[in-house]
Image (spheres, rainbow, N blue to C red):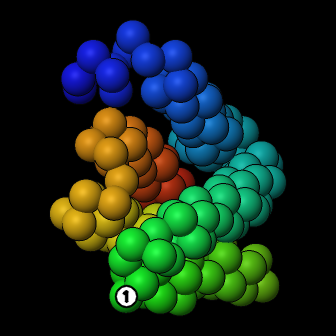
């Protein structure tokens, strides 16, 4: 990280703190499924997948905002981003209707991977800063690890 994008930048520091804090519900749900009473498993899975849908919609919103912000300077990227940005929200909403818990968790894992791939492509195009992509890498790894742990226990 450079001096302008590292921990000395209050905005970057706050983004890291808030994003890592946003992973706490996933960690708590995985901990409950792995180490809590079996009677809490269903609720923990419901919490994890519902929260996943909310976060995936939020991530799609970030991509939507980025698409709007580059509409004049990179119209083709903007078109792709605007189209891709709605995928996480729509599919995350659909995952709420999946009855089978394993399938719900797997769809969430797939969607987090999809959003990460879009972010990686955005980084390659230099449309997002390196610190943000690093943040997305770290938190995506945490979230996916939690969801995989939940799925393995089901």
Could you classify mark 1 by the number of other residues whose Cα lies within 10 Å: few (under 14), some (14-19), or many (20 or more)?
A: few
Q: Is residue 62 visible?
A: yes
> For this view, does 123 lie left or right of residue 114?
left
**Vertical relation: 27 (above or below) 47:** above
Direction front: furthest residue: 72
Percent x, y of residue 3:
27, 16
Foreground residue among 13 and 100: 13
Q: Residue at x 36, y 53 (%)?
A: 128
What residue appears at the point 72 percent right and 55 percent down from the top-left corner?
A: 51
Nearest the camera: 17 or 151?
A: 17
Quadrant of the image containing the C terminus: bottom right
* Residue 138 position within the rendered picture, expressed as x and y whole percent measured from the top left: 35, 40
The residue indicated by pointer 1 is 76
Which residue does the image show at 38% across and 15% down from the upper left? 7
Quadrant containing the N terminus is top left
Q: Is any atom of residue 100 visible in this view?
A: no
In depth, the one of 82 and 40 nearer the eye is 82
| Picture layout, residue 21 above or below residue 56 | above
Q: Residue furthest top?
A: 8
The residue lying furthest to the left in this view is 124
User: Residue drawn at (66%, 59%), measured in percent from left and top?
Assistant: 58
- Compared to residue 27, the image places residue 88 above or below, namely below
Estimate the x, y position of residue 89 in percent, counting from the top left: 66, 76
Residue 4, x across and y down, in percent: 33, 22
Q: Please give the count of numbered marks on the rendered protein.
A: 1
Q: Secondary structure at mark 1?
A: helix
Viewed as shown, does residue 57 lie left or right of 62? right
Q: Identify whether 110 is placed above or below 119.
A: below
């Amino acid at each position: 990280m450079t001096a302008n994008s590292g921990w000395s930048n209050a905005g970057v520091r706050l983004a890291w703190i808030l994003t890592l804090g946003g992973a706490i519900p996933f960690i708590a749900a995985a901990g409950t499924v792995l180490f809590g009473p079996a009677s809490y498993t269903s609720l923990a899975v419901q919490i994890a997948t519902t929260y996943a849908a909310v976060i995936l919609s939020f991530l799609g919103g970030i991509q939507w905002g980025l698409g709007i912000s580059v509409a004049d300077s990179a119209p083709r990227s903007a078109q792709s981003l605007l189209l891709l940005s709605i995928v996480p929200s729509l599919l995350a909403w659909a995952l709420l209707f999946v009855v089978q818990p394993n399938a719900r968790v797997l769809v969430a894992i797939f969607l987090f991977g999809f959003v990460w791939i879009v972010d990686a492509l955005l980084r390659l195009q230099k449309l997002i800063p390196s610190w943000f992509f690093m943040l997305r890498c770290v938190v995506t790894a945490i979230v996916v690890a939690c969801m995989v742990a939940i799925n393995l226990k089901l």
